[in-house]
Image (tube, helix red, strand yellow):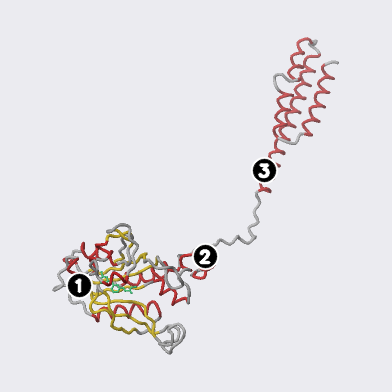
Amino acid sequence: MDLKSKLAELKQQAMKKIEEVNDLTALNELRVSYLGKKGPLTEVLRGMKDLSAEERPKVGALANEVRDSITALIEAQKERLELEKINQALADEALDVTLPGNPVSIGERHVLTQIIEEIEDLFISMGYQIIEGPEVEQDQYNFEMMNLPKNHPARDMQDTFYITDELLLRTHTSPVQARTMEQHDFSKGPLKMLSPGRVYRRDSDDATHSHQFHQVEGLVIDKHITMADLKGTLEVFAKKLFGEDREIRLRPSYFPFTEPSVEVDVSCFKCNGQGCNVCKGTGWIEILGSGVVHPNVLEMAGIDSTVYGGFAFGLGPDRVAMLKYGVDDIRHFYQNDVRFLNQFKVKG
Ligand code: 2NL
């Protein structure tokens, strides 16, 4: 076959294959196979040396035309395939921005944390510091410094988890206050503190008892503190937590660490004092214990009880939450069933 026919056939075959190609890799392979150094076009050009002077420019021109045509078609196909690729990618990644979003379920602080933080915020606003301490305590801080010497009958009131003779799980948050009183520099001003935290008692768990629960204790020590300071403070507290219409009343009581001691009732937030199931017909709900700090407690912490005095109170956030939300079993707070916890979501 002469070179002209060879070129014509080569062109026809190449144009057909390039026309049919449908991806960029195959197109590049075709380019290499037809136009590359080892391709048929190069071979034709190499064979030109054997042609006559008359034939050589004609075949040369034809060879150029064939190469240009193939190159042009390859370029056109390349452009088409690249555009298709981009369009395909855009189609694959298309987003319907009008579709509704998937709702995200957002958690909430535990109901007890909510109550405790509400109490913390109130006392912070009155100038108190929030101070926390260890849950594994020394007998010294948990009992001794709270005016509960060994063999004191009041220790029987507290069924305690002992770890060793001297180490125990704290039965109240008072040891945090004992530690703080010991350290406080009264030349810098009064001590006003609030200690929230977990406490432990050797109770059998039932609807109203848990071996692990919470306590929030408050303590103020300064010169010239009286029962009136205590009453005013607790009135603000009761109104903040149970509503502006609440009143409080004090009843005499006994705690080893306060003298005098009082039990504090708040007028029932459900029936406003008329008598109902929440207040068991009395119109009053007991919410905390408190009193004037016993001089022995001050002295044991190195504070001169003839110069300084104070008041202290303790309450159980578990009980407050049960009253506030009508929860009938303290164990709900510790089982962490989301169906229970989700009832206390502040936001949707
Ligand atoms: C209650 C009663 C109370 C205190 C806690 C206290 C602390 C110090 C000194 C004196 Cl450092 N007292 N704390 C006082 C009276 C009562 O708790 O029923 N809590 C749930």
Q: Residue 86 has which mark?
A: 3
Q: Amino acid at mark 1?
A: Asp
Q: Counting residues from the N terminus, which is met first, the one under dot 2 or under dot 1? A: 1
Q: Earlier in the sequence, mark 3 or mark 2?
A: 3
Q: Secondary structure at mark 3?
A: helix
Please give the name of the residue rendered at 27% of the width and 60% of the height, measured from the top-left corner.
Answer: 138
Task: Identify the amino acid type marked 3.
Answer: Ile
Does the CB distance between marks 2 and 1 fall below 8 Å? no
Q: Is residue 16 above or below residue 270?
A: above
Q: Which mark is residue 43?
A: none
20 or 317: nearer the viewer: 317
The earlier-in-sequence mark between 3 and 1 is 3
Residue 324 in the figure: left or right of residue 296 = right
Which corner quadrant of the image does residue 26 belong to? top right
* Apparent side of residue 85 relative to residue 241 in the rendered image (left or right): right
Front of the two marks 3 and 1: 1
Give the label, 2 or 1, closer to the camera: 2
Residue 208 at what x, y percent from top left? Answer: 43, 73
Q: Secondary structure at mark 2?
A: loop
Please report the residue visible at 81 percent of the width from the left and 30 percent of the height from the top: 16
The front one of 238 and 24 is 238
Drawn side of residue 133 relative to residue 188, left or right:
right
Q: Which mark is residue 337?
A: 2
Give x and y (percent) for residue 253: 29, 80
| Residue 165: image location, x then y, percent | 28, 59
Q: Give the labeled residue for mark 1.
A: 222
